[in-house]
């Protein structure tokens, strides 16, 4: 029983430590899954053996395995003083790995199946990550502070963790990722086309420019409550919706030929 409890605790802690957390990534992938072309969906599932939501958090779960240690820095991207992507020479980040993964999947006829599978998993996760507000690593402001996540609680946690998982988990714990994705999937073809325009760097820059506001929404040591969560939740929804439609576009483009 103790081993079971410890195992469950480890899963919980790992789930809230990185990225969107399982619920956010699963919702992003489920929305993308609803917008894949039938031919894309068939090919992706032939490689993965399952639908894409199943592997939406894989990159977090395997980031500490020796062969994937290199990907630990590839969940975020740096943004400079003008709030645009500012890559660091010699250092991997989310956008660099995404670019590599897309190239490998597009070149799948010359790649091993295992290489295609791993890079599909990278794509499924990273497109979600570059839309998470706290996955912008601003070089000019302090983002590494802690807060008390909710009124009545006493333990401080990283503000990063609040945006990774606390907001979506607290505001949507009554609905599954699949149900949430179906509810989000209401945009017109014109609206979807507008969201899907541009490149991953454009999407990252958009996130960086808009998400700077979250560091005005809370201060170090502050106790968060409804006045924080109510305006934060629409930001999370918007970013997951963007990420879902854009993940569909990336995968559809990869398998267009």
Image (cartoon, rainbow, N blue to C red):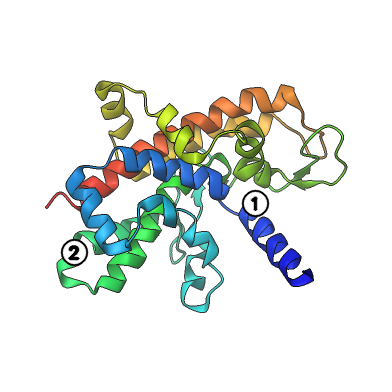
Q: Which residue is found at the position 16% from the left and 71% from the top? A: 110
Q: Which residue is found at the position 21% from the left and 42% from the top? A: 37
Mark with earlier residue (2, 1): 1
Foreground label between 2 and 1? 1
Q: Quadrant of the N terminus?
A: bottom right
Residue 71 horizontal side relative to residue 196, left or right: right
Residue 156 horizontal side relative to residue 9, left or right: right
Q: How many marks?
A: 2
Residue 122 horizontal side relative to residue 149, left or right: left
Task: Tell whether label 1 touches label 2 (CB within 8 Å).
Answer: no
Q: Is residue 84 above or below residue 191?
A: below
Q: Which residue is found at the position 70% from the left and 26% from the top? A: 228
Counting from the top left corner in percent of width and height, residue 169 is at 63, 39
Dividing the picture into quarters, in which one does residue 114 lie? bottom left
Give the class, few, some or many, for how many residues have Cα within 10 Å of label 1's Cα (few <14, many ≥20). many
| Residue 143 in sight from this viewpoint | no
Q: Which residue is found at the position 64% from the left and 59% from the top? A: 14
In the orientation shown, which residue stands out farthest toward the bottom? 66
Which label was assigned to residue 134? none
Q: CA distance from mark 2 to mark 1?
A: 34 Å
Closest to the observer, 78 or 197: 197
Q: Secondary structure at mark 2?
A: loop
Counting from the top left corner in percent of width and height, residue 250 is at 28, 46
Which label was assigned to residue 107? 2
Residue 120 horizontal side relative to residue 169, left or right: left
Q: Is residue 63 above or below residue 149?
A: below
Q: Which residue is mark 1?
A: 16
Q: Secondary structure at mark 1?
A: helix
Closest to the observer, 34 or 212: 34
Give the class, few, some or many, for how many residues have Cα within 10 Å of label 2's Cα (few <14, many ≥20). some
């Amino acid at each position: 029983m103790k081993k079971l409890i410890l195992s469950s605790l480890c899963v919980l802690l790992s789930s809230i430590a990185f990225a969107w957390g399982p619920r956010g990534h699963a919702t992003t992938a489920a929305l993308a899954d609803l917008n894949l072309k039938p031919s894309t969906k068939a090919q992706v599932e032939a490689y993965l053996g399952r639908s894409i939501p199943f592997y939406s958090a894989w990159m977090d779960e395997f980031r500490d395995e020796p062969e994937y240690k290199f990907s630990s820095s590839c969940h975020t991207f740096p943004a400079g003083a003008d709030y645009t992507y500012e890559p660091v020479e010699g250092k991997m980040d989310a956008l660099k790995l995404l670019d590599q993964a897309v190239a490998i999947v597009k070149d799948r006829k010359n790649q091993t199946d295992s290489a295609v599978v791993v890079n599909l998993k990278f794509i499924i996760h990273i497109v979600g990550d570059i839309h998470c507000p706290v996955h912008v690593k601003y070089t000019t402001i302090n983002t590494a502070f802690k807060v008390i996540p909710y009124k009545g609680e006493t333990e401080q946690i990283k503000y990063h963790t609040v945006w990774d998982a606390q907001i979506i988990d607290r505001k949507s714990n009554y609905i599954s990722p699949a149900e949430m994705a179906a509810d989000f999937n209401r945009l017109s073809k014109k609206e979807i086309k507008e969201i899907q325009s541009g490149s991953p760097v454009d999407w990252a820059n958009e996130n960086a420019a808009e998400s700077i506001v979250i560091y005005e929404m809370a201060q170090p040591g502050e106790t968060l409550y409804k006045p924080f969560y109510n305006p934060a939740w629409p930001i999370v929804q918007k970013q997951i919706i963007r990420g879902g439609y854009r993940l569909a576009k990336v995968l559809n483009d990869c398998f267009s030929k």
